[in-house]
Image (spheres, rainbow, N blue to C red):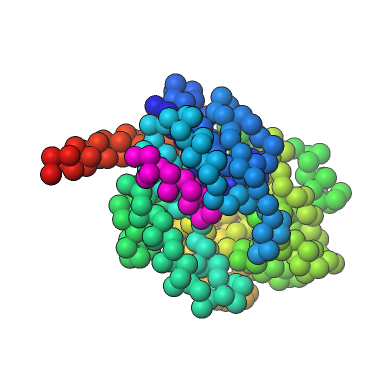
Amino acid sequence: MKIAIITETFLPSTDGIVTRLCETIKWLESQGHQVMVVAPELGVNEYCGAEVKGVPARRLFFYRTKQFALPSRLVKKYLEAFQPDLVHVVNPALLGLAGIYYARRLGIPLVASYHTNVAQYMDYYHLGLFKPLIWHYFRFIHNQAEINLCTSLTVKKELDKRKFKNVQLWKRGVDPETFCPEKRNTDVRRRITQGHPDKKVLLYVGRLAAEKEIEKIKNVLDRSPELWLVIAGDGPYRRELENCFRRANVTFTGFLHGQDLAEVYASSDIFVFPSTTETLGLVILEAMASGLPVIAADSGPSREQIEDGKNGLFYQPSQPDDLSRKVLSLTSGELDLRTMGKAARQTSIDLGWSRASNQLLDFYLITQDDLKIATEEKGLV
């Protein structure tokens, strides 16, 4: 099958969407399928056999640390040259709008996937007034597709309620060979703690933005000098976070990739995840695969991955001291950190990416068949 993936974000950017796409592309190419990626032009021309076609990108006023591609006729040119059997628009908002328009115009089967709860982000930027408009916009563009995919049951329920059509769950995945406890490294641990490897190491991995609520971890550090926080990621909120944690035991690493990221996961002790706005949070699974128990804000998508008291703990975001209590219960020995870490690893061991990618291919084939039937029925009228 020839598959065109049109995405708002791709390499060299780092986030859960890019991770999922890279694993999907690797699997599809390994199975003999031909993939073309259309993405913002950021200097990447090929990935694992898939050709990457760029659309000029620019920084927009509302997000200065990331480059976006606007709708472009280049998308039509790329689709006509590639002649795909199916188009998959990933998190459509700007560039994806062109993907939807030209796929419909050219009569190509269309799948869309929803990965970011933009409407919920509005509350963090004092733009809550625009939430109904945001939902209307995303519902309209997603409902041009034959199938809409999302990555958690919580989000599926929300999209169903918002009248997105034919919403299906796209399974989560992780690479348990890349992310594993065996990557633990004493030199890495010494480096990320700035020479204090005996501290208990808390880790956050992800984009640094207001809606991630990373500053809530500051209260935990204030409660115990025996803790060290490592923040692996970057984003528009980094300067504010550096100011917030100025005199605390914190290391900012910037974005990490591949082996470097795997070693930092495995060389830490506890993964802390304060966000309540995620549609999944793949970093939770990466942390678990690395043998880390997870302490997360109580939210629907996190509950689909964490068993409270077994492979992690939940804290109540509305209770300011609850995160500190949960962290200290693990670092003080009240709860068994090692046993919980082993259970976290066991949770992830059977969730390799081939499972999610196989399912995605099934969705592609169903979409092809459904459009073919609909076209034939239309021809009979």
Where does the N terminus fall, quadrant-wise? top left
Tell me the residue at 38%/31% (across/down).
Answer: 85
Residue 217, by quadrant, is bottom right
- Image coords of residue 310 (percent x, y): 49, 53
Closest to the observer, 297 or 98: 98
Magenta span: 89-107
Tell me the residue at 13%/40% (across/down).
Answer: 380
Is residue 358 visible to us here?
A: no
Looking at the image, is 36 positioned above or below residue 105?
above
- Image coords of residue 171 (percent x, y): 41, 44
Where does the C terminus fall, quadrant-wise? top left
Tell me the residue at 61%/29% (across/down).
Answer: 46
Relative horizontal placement of residue 267, taking residue 164 as reference (left or right): right
Q: Is residue 117 magenta?
A: no
- Image coords of residue 256 (percent x, y): 71, 43
Tell me the residue at 56%/24% (across/down).
Answer: 49
Looking at the image, is 359 positioned above or below residue 157?
above
What is the residue that sits farthest to the left in this orientation?
Answer: 381
Closest to the observer, 108 or 174: 108
Relative horizontal placement of residue 259, taking residue 309 as reference (left or right): right
Closest to the observer, 155 or 96: 96
